[in-house]
Amino acid sequence: MEVGGSVLILEDPTAGVDVGSKADIYALLAKALKDGLAVLLISTDFEEVAALSHRACVFHDGRIVAELTQKTCR
C-alpha cells in the first residue's frame, strides 16, 4: 500500500478476499492509523466496521441515520 496523503479512503477493502489476506489488510490498516493517517472505511460488512472503527456512521438513502462510537459498535 502506497500512501501519500493524510487520509486513506477504502471501499469494501476485504470483499472477496480470503481470511489470511484479510488479516494482512487489517495489519496494514492498523499501521496506517499508527502512522497518523485518518482512515475512511466504506463497507457493507457491519461486523468488519464494528471491529475496525473508532466511530461509524450508518447511512440510509443518503442520510446519516445513526452515529456509533467504538463502545456502541461492539
Image (tube, rainbow, N blue to C red):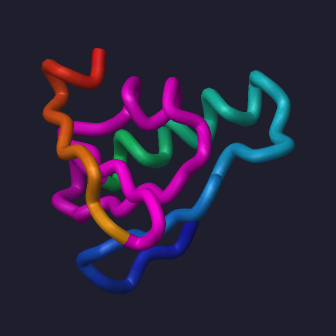
Extreme front residue here? Answer: 61
41 with respect to 53 (left or right): right
51 with respect to 21 (left or right): left
51 with respect to 24 (left or right): left
Residue 73, relative to residue 7: is it above or below?
above
Residue 60, relative to residue 49: is it above or below?
below
Which contiguous range is marked in magenta?
33-62
**9 or 62, which lies in front?**
62
Q: Where does the image place residue 45, in percent across and percent down from the top left?
A: 59, 37
Q: Residue sitting at 30 percent across and 74 percent down?
A: 7
Q: Residue sitting at 23 percent across and 56 percent down?
A: 35
Q: Quadrant of residue 25?
A: top right
Q: Is residue 40 magenta?
A: yes
58 with respect to 27 (left or right): left
Q: Where does the image place residue 39, in percent across and percent down from the top left?
A: 32, 60
Residue 14, relative to residue 38: is it above or below?
above
Q: Quadrant of residue 3?
A: bottom left
Q: Quadrant of the N terminus?
A: bottom right
**34 or 47, which lies in front?**
47
Q: Where does the image place residue 51, in percent across and percent down from the top left?
A: 40, 24
Q: Quadrant of the C terminus?
A: top left
Q: Residue sitting at 43 percent across and 36 percent down?
A: 49
